Image (spheres, rainbow, N blue to C red):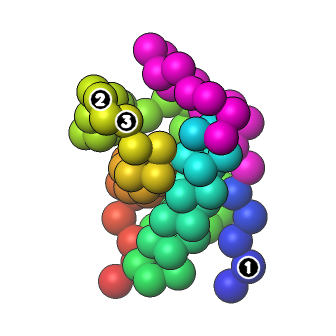
């Protein structure tokens, strides 16, 4: 199955990232989201197309020391959990 996911905008209120942190966060986010979809699949509703205007905040801590890679993984997991239960 070919999956195409378009994320128009990702807003992280209160998180100030350097350009290198932003790049690390994006790479880890994309990698983890791809992994979750490959391993667990998507719900039938998600495969038909959908829009999610917003998601609740994830459990990742933004306190120091900030780790962009870990934060990207947690963001991906939060988004994936908002896509509904995967197919059985």
Query: Looking at the image, which is closer to me, 59 or 5?
Result: 59
Distance between the alpha carbons at the discs numbered 2 and 3: 5 Å
| Residue 64 circle label | 2
Numbered disc total? 3
Instruction: Give the extent of the magenta segment.
Output: 6-20
Q: Residues within 10 Å of mark 1 (few under 14, many from 20)?
A: few
* SS at circle 1: loop
- Image marks 1 and 3: residues in contact by CB distance under 8 Å: no
Image: 13 above or below 55: above
* Image location (x, y in percent) of residue 27: 62, 57
In this rendering, the label closer to the viewer, 1 or 3: 3
**What is the magenta segment's predominant secondary structure?**
loop
Image: 32 above or below 88: above
* SS at circle 3: loop
- Image marks 2 and 3: residues in contact by CB distance under 8 Å: yes
Residue bearing mark 3:
66
Query: Looking at the image, which is closer to me, 16 or 32?
Result: 16
Q: Residues within 10 Å of mark 3 (few under 14, many from 20)?
A: some
Query: Residue 41: in sight, yes or no?
Result: no
Distance between the alpha carbons at the discs numbered 2 and 1: 38 Å
- Image marks 2 and 1: residues in contact by CB distance under 8 Å: no
Q: Residues within 10 Å of mark 2 (few under 14, many from 20)?
A: few
At 37% from the left and 36% from the top, the residue drawn is 66
Image: 26 above or below 8: below
């Amino acid at each position: 199955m070919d999956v195409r996911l378009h994320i128009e905008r990702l807003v992280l209120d209160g998180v100030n990232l350097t350009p290198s942190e932003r790049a690390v966060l994006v790479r880890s986010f994309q990698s983890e989201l791809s992994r979750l979809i490959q391993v667990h699949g998507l719900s039938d509703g998600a495969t038909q197309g959908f829009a999610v205007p917003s998601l609740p905040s994830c459990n990742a801590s933004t306190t120091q020391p900030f780790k962009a890679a870990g934060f990207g993984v947690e963001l991906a997991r939060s988004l994936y959990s908002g896509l509904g239960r995967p197919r059985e």
